[in-house]
Amino acid sequence: MTTRTVFVGHDGSPAARAALVWALDYAAAVGAGVRVVRAWSMSSAPRPASMTGGYVPPIEDFEAAVLEDLRRDVASVVAGSPVEVEYVAHHGSIAEELVREAGADDLIVVGTRGSVDEHCVRHAACPVTVIRGD
């Protein structure tokens, strides 16, 4: 079986960092791309630059702010990697998004975060690798 895409859930935690490091190494070894996914909600998203005074910007501005934070959070890990990396911000559950997006020829890599890794292991159509943090 050839892995097409390695999906990595990333929430900014040390466990997520460890998962991304492992995923990049694995993807480089098998010639796969990596898709780093961050879930968000209105209460967890950073404030977009367009949010001023009483103006609430469109949801796309929140998503862009999440993507900007994600890229900044992983920049030092991804720098120098030969692997093609894609960034995705998903409004909702990270576990459900990883399971929904990953196909049978993909791989999901997550850090140990309790419900997320358990949900992926139980419901994914593809292999799941759980990486312990520090």
Image (cartoon, helix red, strand yellow):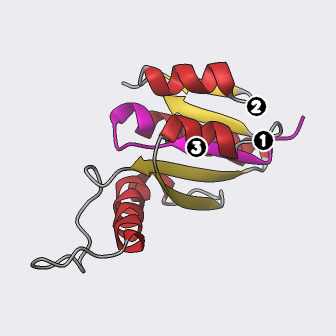
Name the quadrant containing residue 133.
top left
Percent coordinates x, y for residue 94 in the rendering: 49, 40
Q: Mark 2 falls on what kind of element?
A: loop
Image point 35% across, 34% down: which residue? 14
Please give left or right for residue 4 compared with residue 15 in the image.
right
Q: Which residue was labeled with disc 3?
A: 97
Q: Tag 1: residue type?
A: Gly
Query: Which label's residue is closer to the chain start, 2 or 3?
Result: 3
Query: Which label's residue is closer to the chain start, 1 or 3?
Result: 3
Q: Are marks 1 and 2 in contact (CB under 8 Å)?
A: yes
Image point 64% across, 59% down: which residue? 82
Q: Tag 3: residue type?
A: Glu
Q: Tag 2: residue type?
A: Cys
**Range drawn in magenta:** 1-16
Image point 37% across, 66% down: which residue? 68
Name the quadrant containing residue 60.
bottom left
Percent coordinates x, y for residue 91 in the rendering: 45, 53
Q: Which residue was labeled with disc 2?
A: 126
Please give left or right for residue 74 compared with residue 33 in the image.
left
The residue nearer to you, when weighing 39 against 78, is 39
